[in-house]
Image (cartoon, helix red, strand yellow):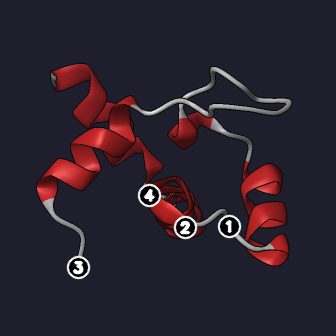
Amino acid sequence: MQDSQFLVDLSKTKMPFGKYKGIFLIDLPEPYVSWYKNKGFPKGKLGDMLGLVYELKLNGLEHLVRELRKSI
């Protein structure tokens, strides 16, 4: 289970490289996140965050992270 600080960090984290550099992880296009799911997420915290973004998008819950970002 992810802790609340992980969700706060996710809400503020931007993609550090590639085509979508500078875009909040939660705002990445779903096909791009799905591509990473199939390719394999990066190691470490970024990969953990992208994995959670995938699950949130799959279940239509990404709005929760956007709302969290607005409230911080």
How far is disc 2 from disc 3 in space, using C-alphas?
13 Å
- Circles 1 and 3: CB distance less than 8 Å? no
Q: Is residue 56 above or below residue 71?
A: below
Q: First in sequence, mark 2 or 3: give its number.
A: 3
Reading the image, the residue beneath label 4 is 45
Q: Report whether 2 appears left or right of 55.
A: left
Q: Nearer the viewer, residue 61 or 33?
A: 33
SS category of the residue bearing label 1: loop
Q: Amino acid at mark 3?
A: Met
- Please tell me whether mark 4 or mark 3 is closer to you in this view: 4
Q: How far, Cα to Cα, is label 2 from label 4? A: 10 Å
The residue lying at 85 percent from left, 30 percent from top is 19
Question: Which numbered dot is residue 41?
Answer: 1
Pick whichever of labels 1 and 2 is earlier in the sequence.
1
Task: Name the kind of residue labelled 4 in the image.
Answer: Lys
Q: What's the mark number on residue 51?
A: 2
Name the residue beneath numbered marker 3: 1
Measured in 3D between alpha carbons, the distance from the residue under mark 1 to the one under mark 3, in whole angstroms, is 18 Å
Between 48 and 72, the one nearer to me in the picture: 48
Residue at figure coordinates x 59%, y 64% from the top left: 54
What amino acid type should be assigned to the residue bearing mark 1? Phe
Whole-angstrom CA distance, mark 4 to mark 3, is 14 Å
Real-space CA distance between mark 1 and mark 2, rounded to the nearest whole angstrom: 7 Å
Judge left or right: residue 29 versus residue 19: left
Q: Position of residue 56 (x, y in %)?
A: 48, 62
Q: Are marks 2 and 3 in contact (CB under 8 Å)?
A: no
Residue pictured at 59% horizontal, 66% vertical: 43
- Asked if marks 1 and 2 touch (Cβ < 8 Å), the reply is yes
Determine whether label 2 and label 4 are within 8 Å by CB: no
Q: Residue at x 63, y 20 (%)?
A: 22
